[in-house]
């Protein structure tokens, strides 16, 4: 599944119990990645989130404090690193 923005992602999460992992960008319209992760923490604390961003590392520090955030990957992300992170996140549910 793919959402156009954070608000749509939250709506989709509310409508489906089949989602185990969310991959999000930091910068999005309507609701940024930080807001989305904090909303997921409140509404769906069983989920894991991988944040992918091209922002500077200092801007991403706040994500590491959110319990649902499994990993923060900085762009450009190598395919193998991304797939390994997704696999590990799903294996440690």
Image: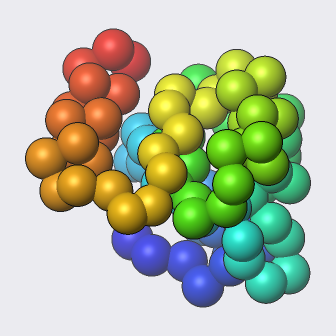
Query: What percent of the width, then of the height, locates residue 1?
Result: 39, 71
The front one of 11 and 78 is 78
Residue 40 in sight from this viewpoint: no
Q: Quadrant of residue 2?
A: bottom left
Tell me where residue 18 appears, x and y as whole percent: 40, 47
Residue drawn at (57%, 65%) of the image:
54
Q: Is residue 2 visible?
A: yes
Q: Nearer the viewer, residue 53 or 34?
A: 53
Q: Position of residue 57 (x, y in %)?
A: 67, 44
Question: Above or below — where is 25 with respect to 38?
Answer: below
In the picture shown, does residue 63 fall above or below 33?
above
Q: Residue furthest left?
A: 80
What quarter of the picture does the C terminus occupy?
Answer: top left
Residue 14 x %, y %? 67, 56
Query: Which residue is pictured at 72% across the width and 77% down the height?
Result: 28
Query: Is 13 on the left-hand or right-hand side of 70?
Result: right
Please indicate whether residue 24 sits to the left or right of residue 20 in the image: right
Residue at 23 percent of width and 55 percent of height = 78
């Amino acid at each position: 599944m793919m959402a156009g923005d954070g608000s749509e992602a939250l709506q989709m999460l509310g409508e489906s119990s089949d989602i185990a992992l969310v991959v999000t960008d930091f910068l999005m319209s309507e609701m940024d990645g930080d807001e989305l992760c904090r909303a997921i923490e409140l509404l769906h604390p069983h989920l894991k989130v991988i944040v992918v961003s091209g922002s500077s590392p200092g801007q991403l520090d706040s994500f590491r404090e959110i319990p649902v955030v499994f990993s923060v990957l900085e762009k450009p992300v190598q395919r193998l690193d991304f797939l390994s992170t997704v696999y590990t996140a799903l294996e440690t549910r």
